[in-house]
Image (cartoon, helix red, strand yellow):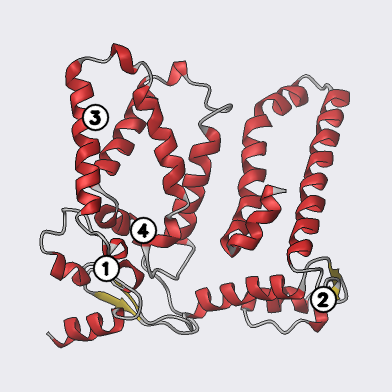
Amino acid sequence: VVLGLSQHAKFSCIFLYPIFLCVVCIKYAHPLFELVIKKNLQALFNSLKTFLKYFLAFIVISVLVINAGYLFHKSLTPLSRYKFDSRLFKTLQAVPALENIRVPLPYAYLRGLDMVRYHADTGKSFGNIYLLGRIKFTGEHYQGFKGYFFYATLFKEPLAAQIFIMIALIVFIWRREKHYFLNNELYLLFPVLFFTVYLNYFYKAHIGLRFLLPAFPLLYIFCGNLLEGWKAFPWTWKSAVTVLCVYLMVSSLSYFPHYLSYFNELVRDRKQAYKILADSNIDWGQNEWYLRAYLKN
């Protein structure tokens, strides 16, 4: 039900479906592989039947929740009657086996996915994209900056938070025998890996760190492993954690109330932040002026 509700909050939540599917496949790959090796076909069949049952339950409930949110408006419209803009959906519509299929989703929902894809592919709804003095001009065949979100994270994410995340990864690897990755951290780290790879290398609308925001709450939860056994920590480690937390608050509050334009202390002169990143990394609406001023200089 919550998965279906998420589709009303943000179109990018469509990625939760492949993420969940991949997580399940990774989690159960080893026991299923053992069943194949042992040639225990009956147990393998039962496992696959159970998987299919839950898979269909997720799909059916999600479809019902999505339809309920749109009051079932124009649901079951044949695919051939949609007016798509994006290349992906036009390609699907042109497949003879699919064109007469009645889509069990509201018309507006599928068109919304199509519009998001179209604008991401063409850049019609935003200006040219910018990174560290370089500009990529939007258009039908434009390409983004590979690794854009690594740079955006480096300059936009508070340094204290970056330090916490790096130390948490190191500590996790060091204590790996104490963790049950497939039962715990898989659910935190796989979505982070998915969004990091997809947004950096397969997504072209590089107009702000905000697209990567879904990954950060999961990373902050992951950082909780740093506090395991807190009472037994030496005072030096407790002091270091406290200092970093205070630094994190001071750094964030120093931008009050203009948090959207936050850059960490790697940017010494805040007035020069537009030379590093633009668009929604700076503000809404002013980014074109920033770019023109920088190019003129």
State which tag comes first along the sequence, 3 or 4.
Answer: 4
Q: Which amino acid does label 2 sit on?
A: Lys
Please provide percent x and percent y for residue 286: 29, 80
Q: Give the labeled residue for mark 3.
A: 241
Q: Residues within 10 Å of mark 1 (few under 14, many from 20)?
A: many
Q: How crowded is mark 3: few (under 14 residues within 10 Å), some or many (20 or more)?
A: some
* Tag 3 near tag 1, CB within 8 Å: no
Q: Distance between the residues labelled 3 and 1?
A: 30 Å
Q: Residue furthest front?
A: 257
Which x, y percent locates residue 280? 35, 70
Label count reads 4
Q: Nearer the viewer, mark 3 or mark 4?
A: 3
Residue identifier under label 4: 149
The mark nearer the N terminus, 1 or 2, is 2
- Going by the numbered disc 3, the residue's amino acid type is Val
Q: Would you say 107 lies left or right of 178 here?
A: right
Q: Which of 256 and 140 is in front in this view?
A: 256
Q: Earlier in the sequence, mark 1 or mark 4?
A: 4
What amino acid is at disc 1?
Leu
Q: Say which amino acid is labelled 4.
A: Phe
The answer for how far apart the CA atoms under marks 3 and 4 are is 26 Å
Give the mark nearer the N terminus: 3 vs 2. 2
**Along the line of sight, the residue nearer the viewer: 213 or 23:** 213
Question: Disc 1 marks which residue?
Answer: 277
Q: Which residue is drawn at 37% across and 61% down?
A: 209
